[in-house]
Image (tube, helix red, strand yellow):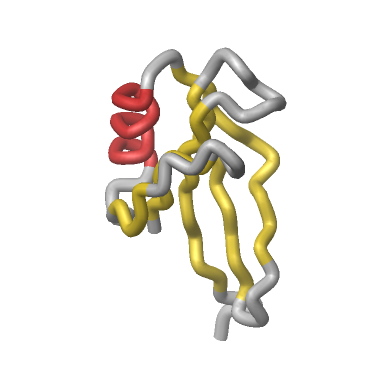
């Protein structure tokens, strides 16, 4: 029996967030069974949304686009899981 805690893995593409205002950013998030989200320590920077999308498709081949927000308040462009 595995001792790992199950979680939902997500990749979120951000459109020029305040910590990287010149880039699209892909961050991996893990949501535990109790609903607690945790960002992975690593992230990737891109010049265009298309580059960020290609990265998500390459690094997370089992993920699908579930929501396209393009919300200027949160800088969330797309959510993949």
Direction from residue 39 to residue 49 in the image, left or right: left
Tell me where residue 3 appears, x and y as whole percent: 65, 78
Q: Residue at x 43, y 14 (%)?
A: 47
Q: Quadrant of the image for the N terminus?
A: bottom right
The answer to which quarter of the image holds residue 36 is bottom right
Above or below, 49 against 56 in this view is above
Tell me where residue 81 appears, x and y as whole percent: 39, 58
Tell me where residue 60 appears, x and y as whole percent: 36, 46
Above or below, 35 against 23 in this view is below
Q: Residue at x 42, y 51 (%)?
A: 79
Q: Nearer the viewer, residue 36 or 41?
A: 36
Tell me where residue 57 appears, x and y as whole percent: 29, 40
Above or below, 3 against 17 in this view is below
Instruction: Please identify the residue farthest to the bottom as the structure is shown.
Output: 1
Q: Residue at x 33, y 58 (%)?
A: 66
Q: Residue at x 55, y 46 (%)?
A: 28
């Amino acid at each position: 029996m595995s001792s790992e805690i199950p979680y939902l893995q997500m990749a979120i593409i951000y459109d020029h967030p305040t910590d990287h205002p010149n880039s699209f950013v892909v961050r991996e998030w893990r949501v535990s069974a109790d609903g607690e989200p945790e960002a992975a320590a690593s992230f990737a920077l891109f010049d265009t949304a298309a580059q960020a999308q290609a990265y998500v498709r390459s690094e997370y081949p089992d993920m699908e686009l579930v929501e396209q927000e393009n919300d200027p308040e949160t800088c969330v462009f797309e959510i993949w899981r």
